[in-house]
Amino acid sequence: MFIGVEIGGTKLQVVAGDGRRGIVRRWRGSVEPRYGAAGIREKIKAAVEEMKKKEPGTQAIGVGFGGPVDFRAGSICKSHHISGWDDFPLAQWLSEIAAVRAVVDNDANVAAFGEAVRGAGAGTDPVFYVTMGSGVGGGLVCNGSIYHGVSPGEAELGHVRLDRSGATVESRCSGWAVDARIRRLQSEQPDSTIARLIGNSTGGEARFLPKALAQNDQAAWRVLRELADDLAFGLSHAVHLFHPRMIVLGGGLSLMGEPLAAAVANALPQYVMEAFHPVPIIKLAALGEDAVPVGALELAARLTANVSVK
């Protein structure tokens, strides 16, 4: 039995599980920025201790952290959301409170690992994963292991530039970027279905896209095509550098479903040199909100099996 921990910008999860049964216990919490990292650690400590009481055979802990991580040292480099995390030795701290070994990695890497081993990419290699939520992150799993560059660098797709003016994949393809596109459409095309659906919403407008697409709203399809084109252009760099066999789309925006996957698959070939055709398979993430916890459990299992996760 293992424990998996997800520390995001707004969400906390602590789960217990194993490779055979998957997740068998779960605790969910929320991030309260006013209490800083110390407040988050109090919640995690209580949840981990409770999990260990219920699962006394726990062997190790895996963690996916929402920010730059020094994987080899097991420490946090920085949090862009919560103060008090800089240079914190998270793996050591968890080992001390739980009396088991711990491994810590960036949450996009951990989600990529979960999807590659237990999700949409199972049985495929290499797998490149992109998560589109409040930000955009990436992870590469090759030969059954997460790719790690020099710490804290990873497969940071969100920071790939799309032009010389500073536009990045994250500035065009994150949830907040899509929300902004939809709000602009509301003033440009007030009679569109998507404009009517969002009404007076002041955030999270992207959640209305699936319904508008289902109603064949042309304004919504325009948003989708622009998003898919920007994402495909960014992903073309990952294709030229890493040559994955599959690209998995995850995060909140992937809930648009097959229309998003199809649009990205349609846009990608034009940006990839013909020598590298056919382009990678594009699939939607299969694990949903469990991608990070499942990946964390798998990392913990690797740790106890003395299998390299580097």
Image: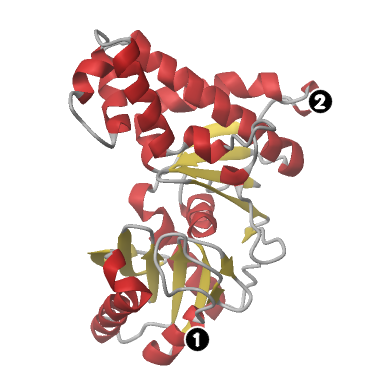
Query: Relative to residue 130, is residue 104 depicted above or below?
Result: below
* Amino acid type shown at disc 1: Gln
Residue 92 got which mark? 1
Q: Earlier in the sequence, mark 1 or mark 2?
A: 1
Residue 16 x/y as whole percent: 32, 71
Nearest to the observer: residue 79 or residue 165: 165
* Amino acid type shown at disc 2: Ala
Residue 257 visible in the snapshot? no
Q: Secondary structure at mark 2?
A: helix
Would residue 151 appear left or right of 51 to someone viewing this image? right
Would residue 49 appear left or right of 143 to someone viewing this image? left
Query: Relative to residue 296, is residue 177 depicted above or below?
Result: above
Residue 22 x/y as whole percent: 36, 62
Residue at 72 percent across and 26 percent down: it is: 272
Residue at 60 percent across and 71 percent down: it is: 71
Would residue 32 appear left or right of 310 to someone viewing this image? left
Residue 118 x/y as whole percent: 46, 53
Would residue 132 appear left or right of 243 to someone viewing this image? left
Q: Which residue is mark 2?
A: 275
Nearer to us: label 1 or label 2? 1
